[in-house]
Image (cartoon, helix red, strand yellow):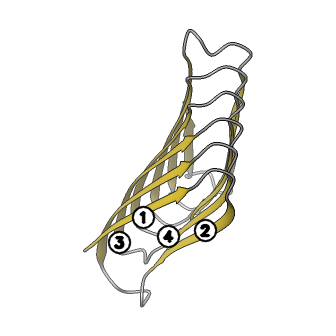
Amino acid sequence: SLFWRLLVVAEPGARFSVVEELTSATPDLSGYVNAVAEIIVSDGAKVEFVSLQNLSLKSWYFASSHGRVGKDAELDWVAGGFGSARGKAWIQNDLAGRGATSRVTGAYFADGTQHLDYDTYQLHAAPDTTSDFAFKGALRDSARAVWRGMIRVEEGAQKTNAYQENRNLLLSKTAVANSI
């Protein structure tokens, strides 16, 4: 079992990239991973965050990721899901400051009997904020994927620009992808 916690704090005006990669030591290693990532992007900062999951097909993967973006700050997030027998990931970005921007690009590939499940949530709590979530997947054999996306705009978050999409390519007649 691995209980992983990552905390990233970008001070005001900071600019940097972080890469998180979860992989198994061997392809036949059984395991359970519970990962938490929290990214705080202070006013005027810019963070590029790459999170890749490529665990063995004998692993279970659960993740909760939360970004908070301040005034005139940017968070560019790339998420990749390629391993694990079963995986469930929650990605939430709170646009908390005026002029905050969040972009999340995700990709996943599943085959065999894999099941990957992604929940995404964009919270626009301040005015003049922009968010963009785009997830794409490819599935074959009897693999399954579920993607759920939600955008919430608070009452005072005027002039919000929000977008989300999920596209899937089914490479066999028995693969299933559900977009909600």
Cβ atoms under marks 1 and 2 closer than 8 Å: yes
Query: Looking at the image, is mark 2 or mark 4 earlier in the sequence?
Result: 2
**Image coords of residue 104 (percent x, y):** 66, 47
- Kindly indicate whether the residue at mark 3 contacts the one at mark 4 (C-beta within 8 angstroms): yes
Residue assigned mark 4: 83
Nearer-the-camera pick, 57 or 104? 104
Q: Are marks 4 and 1 in contact (CB under 8 Å)?
A: no
Residue 114 in the figure: left or right of residue 179: left
User: Which of the two discs, 2 and 3, labels the residue nearer the N terminus?
Assistant: 2
Residue 91: x, y in percent?
50, 45
Q: Which mark is residue 59?
A: 3
Structural distance between the alpha carbons of marks 4 and 3:
8 Å
- In the rendered image, residue 143, in percent from the top left (x then y), is placed at 51, 57
In the rendered image, which residue does mark 2 sit on? 18
Tell me, yes or no, if residue 137 can be seen here. no
Residue furthest front in the image: 12
Q: Which mark is residue 6?
A: 1
Asked if the residues shown at circle 2 and circle 4 are in contact, with their CB atoms under 8 angstroms apart, the answer is no
Residue 148 is situated, as x and y percent measured from the top left of the image, at: 52, 35
Q: CA distance from mark 2 to mark 3?
A: 24 Å
